[in-house]
Amino acid sequence: MTISGYHFSDYASDNPVTIGGLTCAVEESSEFEIKCRIAAQTLEASEGQVLIFLKLSEEATCSMDNEECYFTFTNEGLPVLSEMTYEFDDVEGDYFVTITGTNFDETSETTELYIDGYSQELYSITNDTIVFRVTGLSGTYSTDLVLFVSEGIPEGFEII
């Protein structure tokens, strides 16, 4: 999620954000913009209040027609995951995770897969397939997989 405004800190930890009562983990922050990620909670359309705390002051307020800032989440046009497979490629000599579905952003540089906290290499991406090269794992088995796509929380994320 990207939040635009002004007088934000350049340090991500200085501007904690909550959206609809949920913490949005701040990844980047500059004077005019905060980028954060929120954990998958629901794919139901919803709305709620956005609160931003500034390092040196109280809760930040929004001046949109003297109303509080709210968000609206819709799940229209989001990617849909249908299957995930994991296999060894003899030609490449590595393991690969392939995620199939629809509506993936083919130009996305923010599509990320983490296994046990390790970022995996994005190998290829099309409208219906994302392939990651598996790297940096400490074991042969994991149930801790996290997928981020630029469009939002994909429908069917529970297959991961």
Image (spheres, grey):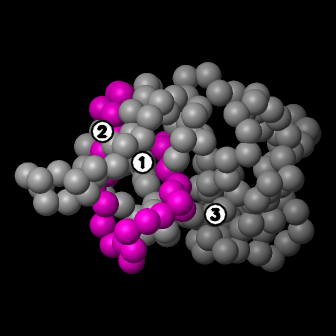
Q: Residues within 10 Å of mark 1 (few under 14, many from 20)?
A: some
Q: Is residue 154 above or below residue 132?
A: above
Q: CA distance from mark 3 to mark 1?
A: 17 Å
**Along the polypeptide, which appears first: circle 1 or circle 2?**
1
* Viewer-nearest of discs 3 and 1: 1
> Is the C-beta separation of discs 1 and 2 under 8 Å?
yes
Outermost residue, left side: 91
Residue at mark 3:
26
> On the image, which quarter does residue 103 sit in?
top left
First-in-chain label (3 vs 1): 3
Q: Reading the chain from its start, which is encountered first: label 3 or label 2?
A: 3
Front residue of 28/140: it is: 140
Q: Which mark is residue 111?
A: 1
Q: Where is residue 73, by image quadrant?
A: top right
Residue position marked by numbered label 2 in the rendering: 125
Q: CA distance from mark 3 to mark 2?
A: 26 Å
Q: Is residue 99 magenta?
A: no
Residue range (magenta): 126-150
